[in-house]
Image (cartoon, rainbow, N blue to C red):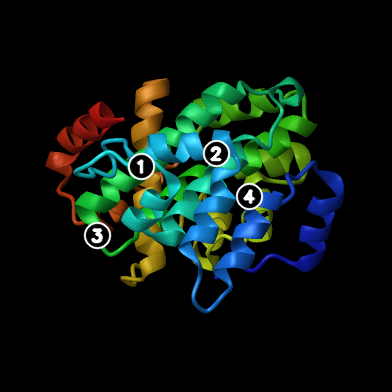
Amino acid sequence: MLIVDQSVLDDIGKGFSVPAQPKLLLSLLKLMADPSPDINAIADCISKDIAVSAAILKTVNSPLYGLSRTVTDIKMSVNYIGIYGVVMLVTGSLLKKSFDPKNCSIDLDLFWKMTTDVSSAAIAVGKQFKRNIAMDKLSSLGLFHACGIPVMAMKYNDYQDVIDKAILTSELSLIELEEKYYHANHATIGFYVASSWRLPKDVCQIILQHHERDYLNKLNGSPEQDLFSVLKLAEHIVSLKYLDCASPDWTYLEEAILTVLTIDKSDLTEIITKITESL
């Protein structure tokens, strides 16, 4: 496990405009801390934010969840996908609202479209190949895995140039290029954001390490390697959709990911096509 020095996290807090945990999420976490959480109180708390409630209902009623009936309110959502699942959807919705596109040097609309698709693709991959992973965990990992990118884009005006270089020259990963130019990287910043927003520890850890090209060098059958592999295949699918090229890390990880997910390489193209069509 990679451990981040506390001084590095302190520097992130001081040097970057990191989104604070919203009051709504704080209120939800307090309600969930009760030994027997009150579903009505949780639903009422979420329903006070109309925009967040609408986003949750839209997601829950999407084909991803495959529910047999239309969910019409937040309490029904809690009953169908559980308290933790709804809170993760709230968390993702609040994250998107935390960044001002006017102060960001990347196309934030495109960024959220891509991360939303990564989240959806991760759920689709997990459903098919790793049913042991909860959908809400895959959803939150997909939405938060790159959340350090807009934080960096709010500070550095030339940040899009570094992203482009990572796509065009895959010899160095994006975090290696970030360290070269800025002496900081979005994975560590993402870990900081995810931890401060109290996401599950294993999700935070994968966010920290999701660009490590040697992460699967020694396969051990761990849930963390399952989570990592699902995310990286989802990233690859979305890169093919939007950029018409493999994700920069894919070449280094493909063989190990297919082993972890028990996918035959001859079936990969068909799998990618079906998941892309579902996005």
**Residue under circle 2?**
52
Q: Residue at x 45, y 35 (%)?
A: 116
Of the numbered discs 2 and 1, the one sitting upstream in the chain is: 2
The numbered disc on residue 173 is: none
Count residues near mark 2 (Cα–Cα under 10 Å), then give few for <14, some for 14-19, many for 20+.
many
Count residues near mark 3 (Cα–Cα under 10 Å), then give few for <14, some for 14-19, many for 20+.
few
**Residue under circle 3?**
131
Q: Identify the element where label 1 is drawn.
A: helix
**29 or 50, nearer to the observer:** 50
Q: Identify the element where label 4 is drawn.
A: helix
Viewer-side label of 3, 4? 3
- Kind of residue at disc 2: Val
Q: Residue at x 35, y 57 (%)?
A: 79
**Residue under circle 1?**
60
Viewer-side label of 1, 4? 1
**Residue under circle 4?**
190
